[in-house]
Image (spheres, helix red, strand yellow):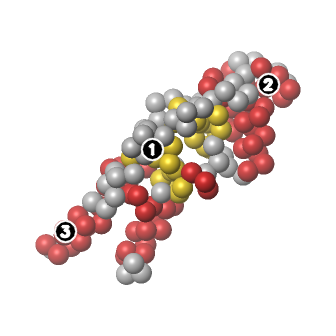
């Protein structure tokens, strides 16, 4: 049992740095984009939810197709072309937890229970990528089957 505890502690205390999907592979939207622009990009990319960044590359929240359409419904934006009048910062989830590149896996997993992905920021607090449930599960499967 002691060996299993040590193994678990070794795995769960690993930094998430190597599990991060880098920003170059992540679609983002800008908080000052209009909803039409954001929704078009989401539809074309296939992403359903993405981080929202400001002009300084700082994470302001996340948005999704659902959040955009729900905002339009609640604000009574009747037509698609009217989405140009509303902006992403109005239709995003704020106060999203972010992780740092040296966050330990245990903490990341605890947060991923409630989020499909989490934005990751570097030491300058700018966006560096995302930690996804998939990247964590892929890692754990490799550890379990001794492929690392």
- Sequence-wise, which precedes: disc 2 or disc 3? 3
Query: Closer to us: mark 2 or mark 3?
Result: 2
Query: Closer to us: mark 1 or mark 2?
Result: 1
Q: Name the residue carrying label 3.
A: 5
Instruction: Give the SS element for disc 3.
Output: helix
Question: Which residue occupies the foreground of this view, 102 or 43?
Answer: 102
Question: Which residue occupies the foreground of this view, 7 or 26?
Answer: 26
On the picture, is 50 further left or further right than 136? right
State if disc 3 and disc 1 touch (CB < 8 Å).
no
Q: Is residue 3 above or below residue 119?
A: below
Q: Is residue 46 above or below residue 63?
A: below
Question: Which residue occupies the foreground of this view, 77 or 43?
Answer: 43
Query: Closer to us: mark 1 or mark 3?
Result: 1
Residues packed near mark 3 inside 10 Å, few (<14), some (14 to 19) or many (20 plus): few
Q: Is residue 40 above or below residue 77?
A: below
Q: CA distance from mark 2 to mark 3?
A: 55 Å
Report the residue at 43% width, 68% height from top: 139
Q: Name the residue carrying label 1.
A: 121
Residues packed near mark 2 inside 10 Å, few (<14), some (14 to 19) or many (20 plus): some
Report the residue at 58% width, 35% height from top: 53
On the picture, is 110 further left or further right than 40? left
On the picture, is 67 further left or further right than 120? right
Question: Which residue occupies the foreground of this view, 122 or 74?
Answer: 122
Report the residue at 47% width, 68% height from top: 138
Report the residue at 42% width, 75% height from top: 142
| Residue most extreme to the bottom | 146
Specify the quadrant that holds the C terminus: bottom left
Q: Name the residue carrying label 2.
A: 84
Question: x, y (%) of residue 146?
Answer: 37, 81
Question: x, y (%) of residue 9?
Answer: 23, 64
Q: CA distance from mark 1 to mark 3?
A: 30 Å
Instruction: Give the SS element for disc 1.
Output: strand
């Amino acid at each position: 049992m002691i060996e299993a505890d040590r193994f678990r502690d070794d795995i769960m205390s690993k930094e998430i740095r190597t599990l991060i999907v880098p920003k170059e592979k992540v679609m983002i939207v800008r908080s000052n984009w209009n909803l039409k622009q954001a929704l078009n990009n989401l539809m074309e990319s296939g992403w359903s939810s993405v981080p929202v960044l400001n002009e300084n590359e700082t994470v302001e929240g996340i948005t999704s197709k659902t959040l955009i359409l729900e905002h339009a419904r609640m604000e009574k934006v009747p037509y698609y072309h009217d989405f140009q009048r509303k902006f992403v910062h109005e239709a995003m989830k704020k106060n999203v937890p972010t992780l740092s590149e040296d966050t330990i896996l245990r903490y990341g997993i605890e947060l991923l229970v409630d989020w499909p992905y989490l934005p990751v920021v570097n030491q300058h607090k700018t966006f560096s990528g995302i930690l996804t449930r998939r990247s964590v599960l892929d890692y754990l499967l490799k550890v379990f089957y001794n492929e690392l």
